[in-house]
Image (cartoon, rainbow, N blue to C red):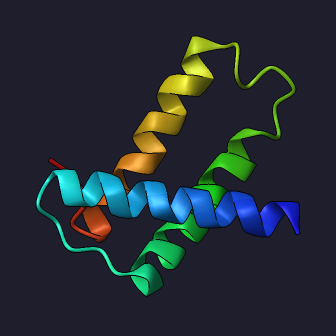
């Protein structure tokens, strides 16, 4: 139940951020993007100190960019 709540808030965050950039993002597409983001983050979390190392954070940003580009969510 907790994970569902977090997913819904991330989906809503994605929809809200897209709206700020005049991009239409429906809930189905937001759910797909949310899933892809979570997959990328899960792969980065394999490293115990992933949130502390700047190199891992930079790699995460690089790996997230194609997700946003694929769904036309980049600026």
For residue 45, side relative to residue 19 (left or right): right
Where does residue 2 sit, x and y in percent of width and height? 86, 60
Where does residue 20 sit, x and y in percent of width and height? 19, 51
Residue 14: quadrant of the picture: bottom left
Is 40 drawn above or below residue 56 in the view shown?
A: below
For residue 4, side relative to residue 29 (left or right): right
Residue placed most toward the observer, 44 or 22: 22
Residue 61: quadrant of the picture: top left
Q: How many labels does the image show?
A: 0
Q: Is residue 67 visible?
A: no
Q: Residue at x 29, y 74 (%)?
A: 25
Q: Residue at x 61, y 53 (%)?
A: 40
Where does residue 51 sit, x and y in percent of width and height? 70, 22
Is 62 drawn above or below residue 26 in the view shown?
A: above
Q: Which residue is drawn at 60% across and 69% down?
A: 35
Residue placed most toward the observer, 13 or 29: 13
Where does residue 54 sit, x and y in percent of width and height? 57, 13
Residue 19: quadrant of the picture: bottom left
* Quadrant position of the N terminus in the picture: bottom right
Residue farthest bottom in this picture: 28
For residue 66, side relative to residue 36 (left or right): left
For residue 35, side relative to residue 19 (left or right): right
Residue placed most toward the observer, 46 or 34: 34
Is 19 drawn above or below residue 31 in the view shown?
A: above
Q: Is residue 37 visible?
A: yes
Q: Which residue is drawn at 80% across and 20% down?
A: 49
Is 35 drawn above or below residue 75 in the view shown?
A: below
């Amino acid at each position: 139940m907790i994970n569902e709540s977090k997913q819904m808030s991330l989906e809503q965050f994605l929809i809200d951020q897209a709206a700020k950039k005049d991009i239409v993002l429906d809930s189905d597409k937001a759910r797909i993007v949310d899933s892809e983001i979570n997959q990328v983050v899960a792969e980065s979390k394999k490293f115990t100190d992933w949130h502390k190392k700047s190199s891992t954070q930079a790699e995460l940003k690089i790996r997230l960019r194609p997700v946003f580009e694929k769904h036309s969510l980049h600026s």
